[in-house]
Structure formats: structure tokens, C-alpha cells
Image (cartoon, rainbow, N blue to C red):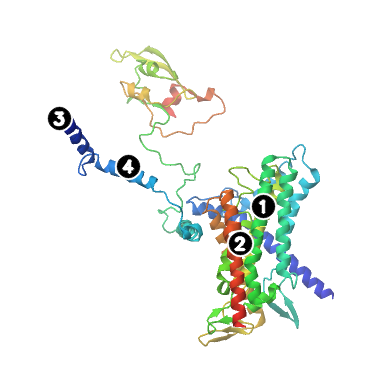
Amino acid sequence: MDNSTEKRRLELEKYFDPKGPFAAMRISQMKRAWKQSNRRELNFWENTYLPMLISGIFLTSKHFFYNVTFHILHLAGLYKEIPGAVTYQYPEKPRPLSSRLRTRHRLTKREDGSPRCVACMMCETVCPARCIEITAAEHPDPNIEKYPAEFILDLGKCVYCGFCVEVCPEDAIRMDTQKLNIAEYSRNSMIYNKKRLMDE
Amino acid sequence: MMTDLLIKFGLSAGTLFIMFNIAGLLTWVERKQSAVMQDRIGANRASIFGFKAMGLFHAIADVLKMLSKEEFMPEGANKFLFNLAPYLSVIFALVGFAAIPIGGALIVNGHVIQLQAANLNIALIFIFAMMSMGVYGVVLAGFSSNNNYAFLGGMRGAAQMIAYEITMGAAIMGVIMVFNTLDLQALDVAQGAYMFGGWVPKWGVFVQPLAFFLFLTAATAETKRTPFDLPEGESEIIGYFVEYSGMKFGMFFLADLVETVLVAALMTTLFFGGWQVPYLHPDGFWFPWGGHVAMGNLPVVLLGILSFFIKMAFFIGGLMAVRWTLPRFRYDQLMNLGWKILLPVSLINIAITAIVITLMG
């Protein structure tokens, strides 16, 4: 037995070892392959459709009676916390969004209410959709140097990639307003200026 | 003479009114039941002065929408047949109700009124004739639309309905042999007998259980509902009414629901005793364990009507549940099931029934 065969055997053992790191994955893969190769014809009872029909109706009826029970209890004002449906009645009751979800942008503020932005142009540079347009001006405070005289963000162009938030050195722009229903009748009203980004 | 005419008129108007309204209500039931079954809420937006009534107004809103839509007719369509087809569908579905008994014999001032719009002694044959005429609506709609998909749907519908018509007829043959009548009112009266020492009512489902399942399957196919909705097949060919719009489409839709009600009523009448209530005799309850509750004619008849509608509602619910449970058959599966399984089994059922009846004398 030469050295290479022994090496190969050890390598294979690593994957087929039932206690090894990939064992569970390998076994499930093999089971799936086995199932696919052992497809069978339906037996007599399955061919009559009746047992399958009854089990199917049992499943759907289970959902039906479970949900109906809770709908009736809701009418009586009981068990309101257990829903009778998995859907949300959208315009009245918005779906809860994850706090990490990238939603509409906002400009954060200093304690005096002015924007935290220092007009460094990082977000405008990194933006792949080129939807940000900053007009810089000199800030009276020499420690801050610059501030945005105007900060225009075109939501009609924005792709919600979140690069502007990641690149910002001052934590001046965030995407945490939880607002996603931005629909307007004209492209112009999709363009947000500094005031709208700070206040709305 | 005049009184008889008025009674007949009242009965037919009442039956038509009730069945039409049930069919209209079914649009709501279908949407709501499927929604609840699939963990959704379902139609709940239509409102009158802020009252939503669990979406019940959607039925009215749907009808208003359909009435106000454009009635489109494709170029090259056969005008006469195109307009005729939806009427044929609805009328033949509705006429069948004339022979369905919704209650027993009501006695008013010595008059015996059978609660059945038409006391036909061939009621069953009449209903089957009307149901098989329903195929004309499907075929004519598909043929006259000048659309290949509609034509395909119509052909599928014709083949399917003819295939399952035979099974349906053969399935009820057993019931006719057991009760020895074609008159549905007499059939319901005969189902008031009891078997096994008076414990089990002699309903069709207990004397002909196999026929019940055959009839259930064939009748579902006859109404063109899922899993047998190949003539419609929304996701593949849209079907024989693809060119229809407005209220003409609404009529096909209504015909579908009316047929569902008719089939549920037939199943109740043939296999579940129609208006029979277990242990209820014309003079009150006679329980097999020896109790007796005396009742007059009116409460007995009212209980009978109630029981008929409860059974019918159960079967309608069952048909709807089947619709939202099963996927559609493939066309070869449909034909195999109809010709190779259901038809031989129904013929075997007739043979066995005949042998048993002969042996029992």
C-alpha cells in the first residue's frame, strides 16, 4: 500500500466519519438521493383518491375551524392577542418592520438643531445611483469648518443600498425612519431637500 | 282550481327565491371560507355607511360592477349563440330545483300541500335531463366565441360532462332500485323507514354507501368545480367563458354556484333523507329507546325544512372545502378516473344491488 492511497483513505474517512464535522450534511444528502431513486407507483388506496382527499380536507378544515374559533372569540372581545389570520390589514395596520431595515433617510441633528453633516461629500461620492447633491458652505465655528447649505436627496433615484450611511464619518445620515410608503404624483416631489430630510 | 294555481306559483317563486339567494350568498361564502382556510381575512372592504358586515356587501358590489361593465363581443363571434349560451347555462341549472322537495306534506285547512314546486313522478329523470342540458351552455359558449382557448374549454367541458353523466346516472340507479321510485317526494318518504331494529334510518347513504361516493365524485365533476375544473382551468386556458364580460360572465359564474346548490340538494334528497329528521314521524318523535314527543303537523314540517337546509349547507360547505383543498386533475387522469374506475365500479354496484334485492325477495 503506497502512501497516496493511505492519504486518500484518511481523507474519505474524514467525510464519512459519523462523528465528523460534515456527517449530518452528508447523511441528509444521501437520504435525499435514496428517496429520489426509490420513487414508487401509488398503491391501491392512494389511487382511489379517497384517503388522500380526506386527509387533505382534514388539514384545511383544521385551519378553518381553528381560525373561525378565534374570529368568533375576537368578536366577543376575547383572546385578541392570538390572531385568526397571518396577514396584516395593511393601510390601517402596517406590518412591523425590523429596526435594521433600510428605510427612508433622515439627517441627524446636533443639540442646537443644526445638521450634524459636515459636507465632506463622502456620501455623494460613494452613492452608486448619484442621488445625493450637497452644496457646501463655511461654518462659523472653525472646529466644524463646513456645513451643507443644501442637501438634496432624490428618492426617485435612490436604490436603498445604505452606502451613504456606512460611509458617513459623523453619523449624520441614517436610514431608520421606518417609512417605506413613499409614493408621489410627480418626480419632483420625490426630491427631498435638507428641511424635509431633517423634519419629516 | 285558482287556489291550486296560487299555491304552485307561491311554491315555485319561493323555491327560486331561496335558491337564488343561497347561490348569491355563496360568492361571499366561497371567498370567506377560502380565506379563513388559508389563514387570511378575506373580502372585508365594501361598506355601506361604514358598516362592513364581514364583507357581505361584496356580493352586491360584485353584481353592480358586473352590471355596469362593458359587454364585449369578439369579432367573428356567432352573435346569436354567443348571447344565448349564458342564459342556457343559468336556466337549466335553475329549472332543476322545481323537482326538489324541500319539505314534507303540509296540511292547511284539509288541503295537503307537498312542499315541492312540481310533483313529477319522474322528478329524478327530469333533473338529470336538465343537468345534462347544461352542457349546451358550455359547448355553445366555447364554440361561438371564435377563440381557440374558449373552444378548447368547451370541448373539454363536453367530454368531461358526458363522461361523468354516465357514472352519475349509474350511481343513483342503485338508490332507485332500493326505493323503487323515481318520484323524489316518494323517495324522501321511503327514506323515513328504519333498519336494524329501528336504530338506523333507511337513508340512501346507509343502504348505498358506494353509490354515495360515486355520486359525490361524479356530481363534483358535473358542476365543473375543482378538482374537475378543466373546462375553466383559470391558470391554463381560462376556459369556455374567456371572451365573456359583464353580466354574461356573471351568469356563468352564477350557473356554477347554482349547480353547486343543486348538487348539494340532490345529495341531500337522494342519500341523506331529504327533509327527514331522524326518529321524527308525522305525529312527532318516536325514539328507538322508547320515548315519544307528540307534535303537530306544522312544527314537523318546519323541522323537516330546517333539516333539509342544514344538510344542504353541510354539503355545500363540503364541496367548497374540496375546492380549496385539492389541485386540478390532469386531463388523462380525469378520463381514466371517469371511464376506467368510476363507471365499472358503478356498474358493479348496480349488479350487487340487484343480486341482494333478488335474494331478499
Q: Quadrant of residue B65?
A: top right
Q: Mark 3, residues whose alpha carbon is within 10 Å: few (<14), some, or many (≥20)?
A: few
Give the foreground label among 1 and 2. 2
Can you see residue B192?
Answer: no
Single out the mark in the foreground, 3 or 4: 3
**The label number, if any, that marks residue B343 in the structure image:** 2
Categorize mark 1 by other alpha carbons within 10 Å: few (<14), some (14-19), many (20+). Answer: some
Nearest to viewer (mark 2 / mark 4): 2
Q: Nearer the viewer, residue B169 or B95?
A: B169
Q: CA distance from mark 2 to mark 4?
A: 44 Å
Extreme front residue here?
A: A1
Residue at disc 1, secondary structure:
helix
Q: Which residue is mark 4?
A: A29
The residue that label 1 is drawn on is B159
How packed is label 4: few (under 14 Cα within 10 Å), some, or many (20 or more)? Answer: few
Instruction: Identify the subunit bearing mark 2.
Output: B
- What type is the residue that disc 4 sits on? Gln
Spot occupied by residue B188 in the image (x, y as percentages of width and height): 65, 75
